[in-house]
Amino acid sequence: MTTTDNNEGFRAMVAQSDLYKNRFEQVVQRVTEIAADEFGIALDRDAIVNLPEARICTISDVGLDAAQVARELAALPAVIKAKANKDLKRDIEAGAASAIASLPKDRAARLTAARAGGFAGGATSTAPKHSADEEAVLLRRALSLGSAKARLDFCRKHGLA
């Protein structure tokens, strides 16, 4: 079973006409600018082909309506998700209890949501870097500690883990 592209006819027309190719390149450039400025996202050509306003402007000699493009972009799932992630990040950074409560309870799901929301990884180590000799001494000292937890704590404290 094969899937068909809803915009096959449009793609064929653009491929066969230099005029349509040039217009489409201009539309792609303008829509990409609008998407970046208004929503902070990058769109690929396939997403732009799916916008009715982009197809209309390519085929006709009508100028691109930026407001209409913005409305069509706002309805795209990628834009909706990016906006939700941006709002959630802003609310969490502001300390909004409702935003924090809306996060998944499962640790893995929370990490996935944080990464999707644009949060950076964990805190970086502030321990100074050690020379190879110093590191060897510290590792020997860590190995002499009794429990695995004590060894791990020691290594973390000295920037080895």
Image: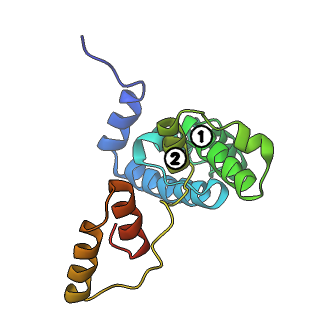
Q: In the drawing, does residue 157 fall left or right of residue 2?
A: right
Q: Split into 4 quadrants, where in the image is the N terminus?
A: top left
Amino acid carrying label 2: it is Ala
- Taking the spot 34% from the left edge, 84% from the top edge, the residue there is 129
- Taking the spot 58% from the left edge, 59% from the top edge, the residue there is 36
Q: What number is the disc on residue 12?
A: none
Report if residue 86 is visible in the image: yes
Report if residue 59 is visible in the image: no
Q: Position of residue 20 (x, y in %)?
A: 41, 47
Label 1, residues with CA under 10 Å away: few <14, some 14-19, many ≥20: few
Q: CA distance from mark 1 to mark 2?
A: 9 Å
Residue at the disc numbered 1: 81
Q: Position of residue 119 (x, y in %)?
A: 55, 57
Amino acid carrying label 1: it is Lys
Residue at the disc numbered 2: 116
> Which is more foreground, mark 1 or mark 2?
2
Q: Out of 156 and 154, give the one closest to the viewer.
A: 154
Closer to the N terminus: mark 1 or mark 2? Answer: 1
